[in-house]
Image (cartoon, helix red, strand yellow):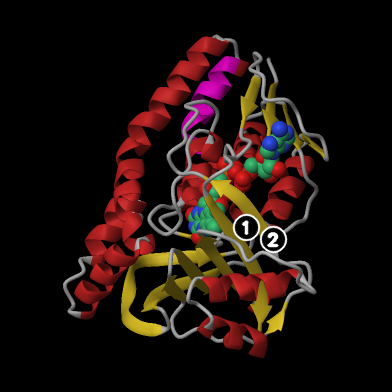
Amino acid sequence: MKSLNIIGGGLSGLGLANGLLSAGIPVTVTEAGHYPRHRVCGEFLTSLREDTLEGLGITECFSESVRHQSTAWYRRGKKIRSYKLPEPAIGISRYTLDKCMVSVIREKGGRVIEGVREPISPKEGTLFATGRIPTHKGKIGLKGHWSSLQTEEDLELHLGKGAYVGLSAVEEGFVNVCGLFSRIAQGEFPCPVERFYATLKLHDLEHLTGRLESGQYRELSFCSVTGLDYSRKSNLGIGDHNRQIPPFTGNGMTIALESAQRIMPYAVKYAMEELDWKGFQDKSQSTLHNHYKQRYLQARLAHPFLLNPVLQRFTAIIARAGFLPFKTLYHLTHS
Ligand SMILES: Cc1cc2nc3c(=O)[nH]c(=O)nc-3n(C[C@H](O)[C@H](O)[C@H](O)COP(=O)(O)OP(=O)(O)OC[C@H]3O[C@@H](n4cnc5c(N)ncnc54)[C@H](O)[C@@H]3O)c2cc1C
């Protein structure tokens, strides 16, 4: 039986490794960073099915997660409207989730090599799950955890000037505060959180600063990522490396795990020598393309309504008037 090497130990790489090991296929994951660590992510999972978790053998990693039922939207501090989510969502931090998925891989006899950045050069038996392809332009993602912070609904979505920020609970009483911004505050700051506050202010979201200051910041939870460009695609590998979907108008965490489940049968066939490497790649890519092409398109069309000031205003007006088809938009962008 052939083994597989997975480069990148985020959700898609760890998900696939877990699934393959459950099917008896030997796997090595090589990850540039170390576990556990905080990641820039809204940590809000929608439309994730039980059978995906069971198929990948990672159900236990969601034992500490919380369930979400509702959302409230705000624009520049003023409430727009509350909505009930069409289906419950899941809240769990990447710190806990990635850590658990790595330990399950090791328990199943798989290898996870940490702290090694591999070159992205195609090789038989090596699959890329290395996340976004960074660019010099693109958006900036910032996130941190706070405790002693109440949210009005399970997910608060705050629209700012060229930015949006989500607040939602994860395990152990923490609230994840994560946003997508057009730029980051420049200058010297005594600590990263002060830069976060200054960036909120820069995007007309300073009303959030007071709330965050009244809560308790979780040490070392602040992280940032730059060069988020949602128009790039590689059509190779899985997860964000294949293609990124903008947060809130798409569910990248679920797509990362689902993609692992969808390509698993071909990876198993490759390992059993029933399919050659090219056959595996062709089948995987056409499966992912067929399943998600519509979703990427809808997400890209919907995303400007959260970021562009004129479209944001339009969104707020029709939502306040009760004409926003929230349920339909949710289904178009999440399932
Ligand atoms: C601001 C923001 C908010 C988001 N909020 C949500 C949300 O609420 N819900 C949701 O569903 N999705 C959300 N997403 C999207 C979600 O985070 C991603 O879609 C998901 O993490 C993709 O998983 P992945 O495994 O493909 O990539 P990643 O999780 O990014 O993992 C890639 C891994 O590869 C490693 N790596 C990279 N290069 C190399 C190399 N050369 N060698 C070795 N290792 C390497 C990296 O260190 C990383 O660990 C959000 C994204 C952003 C930016």
| Residue placed most toward the observer, 308 or 281 | 308
Locate residue 266 relative to residue 288 in the image: left or right: right
Position of the N terminus by quadrant: top right
Secondary structure under tag 2 reads strand
Q: Residue beneath label 1, please? A: 40
Q: Residue at x 36, y 63 (%)?
A: 306
Query: Hey, which quadrant is residue 221 in on the image?
Result: bottom right
Question: Considering only order in the chain, which callout, 1 or 2, is on the residue closer to the N terminus?
Answer: 1
Residue at the image position 55 percent from the left and 76 percent from the top: 201
Which quadrant of the structure image shows residue 157? bottom left
Q: Is residue 252 above or below residue 199?
A: above
Residue 303 at what x, y percent from top left? 36, 55
x then y, percent, for residue 248: 42, 59
Name the foreground residue: 284 vs 197.
197
Disc number placed over residue 114 in the picture, else none: none
Residue linked to disc 2: 223
Which amino acid type is marked by label 1?
Val
Quarter holding residue 173: bottom right
Q: Assess mark 1: CB under 8 A from ligand 1? A: yes
Vertical placement of 311 versus 295: above or below?
below
Q: Is mark 2 within 8 Å of ligand 1?
A: no
- Residue 33 x %, y %: 78, 45
Q: Position of residue 9 (x, y in %)?
A: 69, 41
Classified by dominant secondary structure, the portion drawn in magenta counts as helix
Q: Is residue 69 left or right of residue 298?
A: right
Distance CA(mark 2)–CA(mark 1): 6 Å
Identify the amino acid type marked 2: Cys
Disc 1 is placed on an element classified as loop
Q: Is residue 292 above or below residue 249?
A: above
User: Marks 2 and 1: CB-CB under 8 Å?
Assistant: yes
